Image (spheres, rainbow, N blue to C red):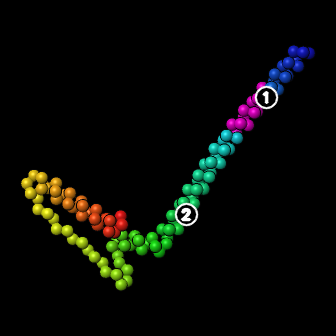
Amino acid sequence: MLLATAVVVVYLVFTVVGNAIQSFQLEEDENSLSDEVQGLEDRYDRLSALREYMNSDEYIERIARRELGLVGPGEMGIIVLSTPVPAEGVGGEGLQIEQEQQQDRWWEDVIGQ
């Protein structure tokens, strides 16, 4: 009788411990999934805000100005042409490339890229 009781008690202890471990693991999974859902909701909010901005007149005007070179009514468009610097000897080509890159950077500063 004592042996049967000991077997039942050991069985119950293992069952309770097993259930406690499984409950702990399920709680960790729930927390992990909740964090993932929150991250996805945040991403959805950012993407929705981006979509709303991309549908706005402000964004369309910005792209039209920057990518297409369009100007608004009453504005004057300016086209900047650079004259190439003649290359002098072997090192002259590097100087010309450097000057062209500086001119490109200046133009990027003006148009806001």
Q: Secondary structure at mark 1?
A: helix
Q: Quadrant of residue 75?
A: bottom left
Please indicate whether residue 82 sits to the left or right of residue 90 in the image. Answer: right
Q: Quadrant of the N terminus?
A: top right
Q: Residue furthest left?
A: 89
Q: Quadrant of residue 109?
A: bottom left
Asked if one can make out residue 98 in the rendered structure from this viewpoint, the answer is: yes
Which residue appears at 16% of the width and 54% of the height? Answer: 94
Q: Secondary structure at mark 2?
A: helix
Q: Locate residue 100, reporting x and y percent.
A: 21, 61
Q: Is residue 111 or residue 22 the one in the foreground?
A: 111
Which residue appears at 36% of the width and 69% of the height? Answer: 66
Disc 1 to disc 2, C-alpha distance: 48 Å
Which residue appears at 11% of the width and 62% of the height? Answer: 86
Which residue appears at 55% of the width and 63% of the height? Answer: 48
Q: Is residue 13 above or below residue 49?
A: above
Residue identifier under label 1: 15
Residue identifier under label 2: 48
Q: Quadrant of residue 60?
A: bottom left
Q: Which residues are magenta?
A: 14-26
Q: Quadrant of the C terminus?
A: bottom left
User: At label 1, which amino acid type do we have?
Assistant: Thr
User: At label 2, which amino acid type do we have?
Assistant: Ser
Crowding at mark 2 (Cα within 10 Å: few <14, some 14-19, many 20+): few
